[in-house]
Amino acid sequence: MKTIDRDTITVIIADDHPLFRRGLKHALDDTHDITVAAEVSNGDDLLSKIKEDKFDIVLLDIAMPGKSGLDLLKQLKTEHPALSVLVLSVYPEEQYAVRFIKAGASGYLTKESASEQLAQAIRKIANGGKFASQKITEKLAFESSDPDRPPHEKLSNREYQVFCMIAAGKPLTEIGEDLSLSVKTISTHRSRILEKMRMTKNAELIHYAIKTNLL
């Protein structure tokens, strides 16, 4: 077991899959300067834990039960602005990386990333940097000045979340249950999404998501 000193980077893993947490902890145990100091399986436990103890970085899964990933990130950055967050997600970076970094995350990695890349990202973030692929970095740099942004980037965060769930084939009732919103509210979001993207039916949203590698 590693000894924690002031030069060690302490992280907390927030992920609802025990096997993934175990694998992540095992990978980081092989480093000399990074220690997994705690693990939690949902957003509420994460918020409670970081009030009790001090951590350098949160390794955050964005698809845990309860509060949505974006809402949880925003609360973390509001209540603990100095705490760095590295998002680890099953979703491809094309789908969510820009939105999470703009919302305050210090980096975004897919769960398929190599352990060496994860350690590199943690060290860079611990030293005050940001970690993202070159493609995402360029997207962030030029997004605001690009008049030809793709339609899905014009959606609000909630609209985008609903769009991704519709594109994945989820019915409106299930989306409402997942997001703790009424079917009427989800239906309103769907109407706005279709209007903003100049489409008329769900099949067009699904086709668009496949064509743009969002699924």
Image (cartoon, grey):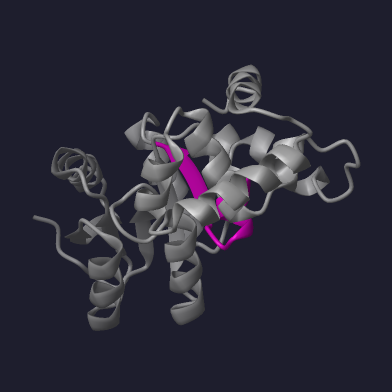
* Front residue of this view, candidates 7 and 148: 148
Q: Pick out the residue farthest to the front.
A: 184
Residue 166 appears in the figure: yes
* Front residue of this view, candidates 56 and 188: 188
Q: Is residue 52 left or right of residue 199?
A: left
Residue 138 appears in the figure: no
> Which of the image's four quarters has the N terminus?
bottom left
> Is 102 contained in the magenta span?
yes
Give coordinates of residue 167: x percent, y percent: 53, 29
Q: Residue at x 22, y 49 (%)?
A: 16
Res. 39 image quadrant = bottom left
Q: Residue at x 43, y 35 (%)?
A: 171
Q: Is residue 212 left or right of residue 166?
A: right
Look at the picture and state if 128 lies above or below 49.
above
> Is 8 contained in the magenta span?
no
Look at the picture and state if 193 lies above or below 71.
above
Give coordinates of residue 113: x percent, y percent: 40, 31
Q: Is residue 130 left or right of residue 34?
A: right
* Front residue of this view, candidates 138 and 95: 95
Q: Residue at x 42, y 64 (%)?
A: 72
Q: Residue at x 20, y 60 (%)?
A: 40
Look at the picture and state if 201 lies above or below 197.
above
Q: Pick out the residue farthest to the left.
A: 1
Give coordinates of residue 192: x percent, y percent: 69, 47
Number of numbered discs overlaid on the protein picture:
0
| Residue interval drawn in magenta | 98-110
Give coordinates of residue 51: x percent, y percent: 29, 81
Look at the picture and state if 168 lies above or below 136.
above
